[in-house]
Image: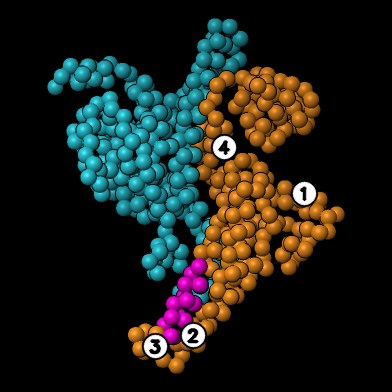
Chain colours: A orange, B cyan
Amino acid sequence: MYGEIGNKLVQHAKRTQSLAHLPPYQTELVRAVTREVRDLDKDVGTILEPFAGSFDPSTEPAAACALLVNHLCMRRNKRCLLAYHRTRTDKLEEMCWGGIDVLERQQEQQANKTGISDDVGKIGADGAGSSLSPEEEEYVRQYSDLLAAYKGQWTDIDLTGSLEPPKDLFIDVRVLKDAGEIQTEYGAITLTKNSQFYVRQGDVELLIAQGYLQRLS
Amino acid sequence: MDIDDLLAEVSVDSISQETRDLQELTRSWVAERVAPEILPWPSDLMERVLDRIRRQIELVEDQTGNMDPKTNFKLIVIQTELERFKFLVRSFLRARLKKIDAHPLHILARHAASATDLLPLLSPAEHQYLTSHQALLTSHYASSFLSQFPASLQRMDDTTGGISMVDKPDEDAAVFVRVLRDVGEVAVEGTDKRLEMKRGDVWVVRWSTMRGWVASGDLELI
């Protein structure tokens, strides 16, 4: 009662900030906090009931104090929930910008996790291996669309490109994973593993971000 | 009027539009990255810059087939310049988006207030991004937990209890400014400090005091 579970959520959010991946969604905690808010709201209703709309705080200091505490707790819980969800969506947005396919990665993780059983205990009650809630998956899908739409207005600029000031037009790269054939202005290049190329930075930026290529300095 | 002012006038007129645009773009980019709040969208400047980028890309595409070493070398110079321009614009746009994401409701309110001004705060594309992103977030919160809340607690811009839910950037944050034109004596609000700002000076002052002069071009952020 009174914000203890909300505190746990905030601790989770704080931890999420410094992690590279997204930890599992705390379905149980979110539900518990929401339930707490509803209970507190019911309490407020019960306290106010005998007064039938003519409540005067100065004559009933005890009831007024209880009401205030309840109200503050509800608001605090709301803030905790918002902060928790916002931290996670920020993280997801960051991944969208970084060119990482979040949903695909989730499926991979799910496949990996089936062998590890001690993680299952931490995951929410529905038992699914995904660390995203269904709402979050939907959010990622829609945000990717939104991002694509906004990017589409700046086709010449390539908004998700590198934020490092460009020094050289051409760079040396090594291929870490087979990436197939890419088209450049100087013809097609086939990127096979362990080969090395001298290519235009703009042509391969996305592949570097996705981990197919490594930049050599 | 002394010799410096005369020199300044002469030099501004003799520089070509392209060079001035680059200077202006660089200045906007630096300002946007340094200023604590989002600055008005420089629509004319961006139109000219984007137009020029498009023309250069077309030029590069036209001439890549040409294997003559001379044009080839010229192309490399053009492409390098193009990459730098693209970087400036990209970094500028991303800096703005970052602020838009950080303080959506505050910026939305300010944009609505500036809609009739000469320079609206956001470009149409940014405004659209902001509203759709906000709609997405709201529906995400609602479906995750907010819809089960008591109706009185479902608002996203609540100000009861002395705390506003709408977050604001810190407008009193300190910024570095360089004086481009003599401003004279400036009083910093809330303190008894008075500054004599002369052309060429560099000061660290709170942003809220400097805002007006930066907008009018008397100061630049560095």
Which one is in front in this view, the residue at disc 4 or the one at disc 3? 3
Say which label, 2 or 4, has the lower sequence index: 2
Residue A27 located left or right of residue A178: left
Q: Earlier in the sequence, mark 3 or mark 2?
A: 2
Q: Amino acid at mark 3?
A: Glu
Q: Nearer the viewer, residue B9 or A29?
A: A29
Q: Which residue is mark 4?
A: A160
Q: Quadrant of residue A26?
A: bottom right
Q: Is residue A74 magenta?
A: yes
CB under 8 Å between callouts 4 and 3?
no
> Which x, y percent locates residue B72?
57, 11
Element under label 2?
A: helix
Q: Which residues are magenta?
A: A62-76
Residue pictured at 53% horizontal, 83% vertical: A42
Q: Amino acid at mark 4?
A: Thr
**Magenta span main SS:** helix
The picture places residue B20, in percent across and down from the top left corner, at 34, 23
Disc 4 secondary structure class: loop
User: Which chain is indicated by disc 2?
Assistant: A
Q: Quadrant of residue A30?
A: bottom right
